Amino acid sequence: MTMKTKTTALLLALFLSVSLLYGCSKGKSNNAASSGDTGSSGGDKVTIEWLVRTDPNMIDWEKDMIAGFQKDNPNITVKLTTIPQAEIDQRLTTMISSGKVPDVWSPNWANSGFASYMKMGALKDMTSFIERDSGDISTINQQIMDIYKIDNKTYGIPMLAIGSFLFYNKELFDKDGVPYPPTDWNDTSWNYDAMLQKAQKLTHDVGNANKQVFGVLNSMSPNLQTWGFGGDMFKPEAYTSAVMGEPAVLTNPQNKEALQFNVDLIQKHKVAPNQATVDAVSAVGDPFLTGKVAMVINGGWGFWAYGPAKFKWGVAPIPYHDGRKVPLFVDPWCISEKSKHPEESWKFIKYLVDPNNGGKKFMEKTSATPADTSLADQWYQQMADKTGMKVEEVKQLNEGAVQNGREADNHLIDKFAVISTTINQTANSLWNGQKSVDQGLQEIDKNLRSLKF
Amino acid sequence: MSAVNATELRAESAAKLKKRRNPERAREERAFWMFISPWVIGFILFSGGPILASLVLSFADYNVIDPPKFIGLGNFSGLFDDRLFYKSLSVTAYYVVLVVPFTMISSLLLAVLLNQKVRGQPLFRTLYYTPSIISGVAVAYLWSWLLNPEFGVVNSLLGQWFGIRGPGWFTDAHLVIPSMVLMQLTAIGGTMVIFLASLQSLPSDLYESAAMDGASRMRQFFRITVPLISPVILFNSIIGIISSFQAFTQSYVITKGGPDWNSYFYVYYLFDTAFFHFRMGYASALAWVMFVIVFLLTLLSLVLSRKLVYYEYDSRG
């Protein structure tokens, strides 16, 4: 009997000590937080957490930013957290649910994207900061600044604004004597039929894995392909309210034209690889970089992603079509709604996008198209040096991409990661020729409607 | 009288003895709890706690940011008209039906082979077990390469030796699950070792007398080996059902659930629900439904096995 009580007592003691340990660590962090709170007004140390996706190319820039910012602001310490992009959603969910959120981060660096986190209430309304310090960010392109303004509240400061283009392999064009496409987005003779004709001349040896060259590959997602033809799988309100709502998959006739065109490229004209081939080739590397695809429609990251190519390449607009819209990819810096140090976080964001300092260094390091207009000329020069194109051509291309651009669907519609998986599951069987376009569109519509959020 | 006294005395001394031994037992008991406490506490805090929490959450609507809202059986009734719930469940069931027999047969076969007395036997055992210690993600990548339709070893050998254009192993809607079953060839090491251990404990006299009676090796295998190791087969099958119901990695790494949802496993759906739909309550409900299904399947295999499994010291002998 006594032994039993002793054992129980022992267990209890163990439990108590464990919970005490927990309590202690909790108490400590609370203390730190509260002393930090007073710190912003008093002068004690404040620590803010900066979450970025793992990218070996950016580490130098990140370290440089932290060192520079801490030197200017000795009372603020920036703690860097790096997480691989594919894991950010999972980690953030646990961080948010436990209330331990990163202060500064970019929701587009998680697969879920801006809209999902904005809708969730995880992002801070930065309007009052922006109004107060409007002079510090006045050079950011206003059209791009407005992308992350929802119901007149701004939730993010754009750090980059990448357009969409058609990249082409100059060597393959030269070999077959095919003239290069133009650089003017308003040149209506550069349309999808013109692209198809070029693709037909460039395609050869399809079926022989070692020799085959495909004329073209549209690597945009199905919905973004429909944009190029004036279509859309969603209603305009979906992009402003962040709620998918009733899909417009079947109601917008351009959707069928767009998807049918791509299916025909693959199945009828056989100038584009099917999904199985793309998957197979992608395992080896980027399809365009393998030199087996003459033209590829892709986001503007091609400007630097195709840097290592062993051949010369050029850039052209996405072919003209009535109502053509092409995606823009704008990544913003945001502050967590639950951040304990919004003021310090805002200060850090201003440092990161400063066109004379952080923003400039970011562009030089990553080659990403800047959202800040005062950096544009330098970027055109940088890209002209890289690609061997003329500065005016790069300028013309990029300005056209912004004019014809609208922010990508995955950043503006809540839970788009789920929506895009749903569309892709069916689209892949379209590209592989297992379903007709009508059948596929109906299935996409049905599947989107049955999504439960 | 004296006899009674004697028994009383004996009883008394026995009680005394017991009392004397008690402190030692208590010390041992105390030590037991001391040493096991890290695991007990670890379990309660890191497994038991979350398990309970998920049970509570399965009755709530919880999007991570706002506090959970109790919705009764709403999550569970929602399952009935959820297309993806049925799809992912049927994909998983199809996979389990194929993979469990496949793993059992191939690992038993391998165990029998590795039980032969041949030169280099320890080396073979090590070699065939090795793939099992590699992480699932690495193995999945390896297979995606082996079975790559354009550049994979398997398809290029099919082309060179037989002139066949190999299929899109992971891109063909009908082949994707069988391909994933095939992938388990590199994951059978653990099952194989358990079979091997049980094969080694079999009494050799049974085989000697069977051989004397003229039973062929085949007959010996089915009449002696299989019945004797039937409890191990049952154990491995149950573990196999449980683990293959949790299939996730291969689909996440190679196919992303495609083509056309044909490798969208139940756990993949659960994962998406939690971390992309941000519906923790619904995901918890999915998890508990899976627990019930696996539990029922385990019970069913235990009941079905009553007639098939032979326990050496069983009264039914």
Image (tube, rainbow, N blue to C red):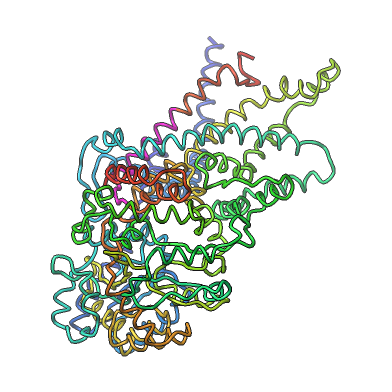
Number of marks drawn:
0
**Displayed quadrant of residue A225:** bottom left
Depth order, front residue of A12/B165? B165
Q: Is residue B293 magenta?
A: yes
Residue shown at 48% from the left, 38% from the top: B245
Is residue A30 rendered to the left or right of residue A392?
A: left
Question: In the rendered image of this protein, does residue A283 appear above or below residue B46?
Answer: below
Please report the residue visible at 29 percent of the width from the left and 48 percent of the height from the top.
B279
Residue A17 makes an appearance in the image: no
Q: Which residue lies furthest to the top in this view?
A: B1
Percent x, y of residue B218 = 77, 23
**Among the 4 quarters of the image, the one containing residue A182:** bottom left
Residue B253 visible in the picture: yes
Locate residue A395: give its quadrant.
bottom left
Q: Where residue A186 sits: x, y (%)?
A: 31, 75
| Region rendered in magenta | B277-296
Residue A115 in percent (x, y) is at: 26, 61
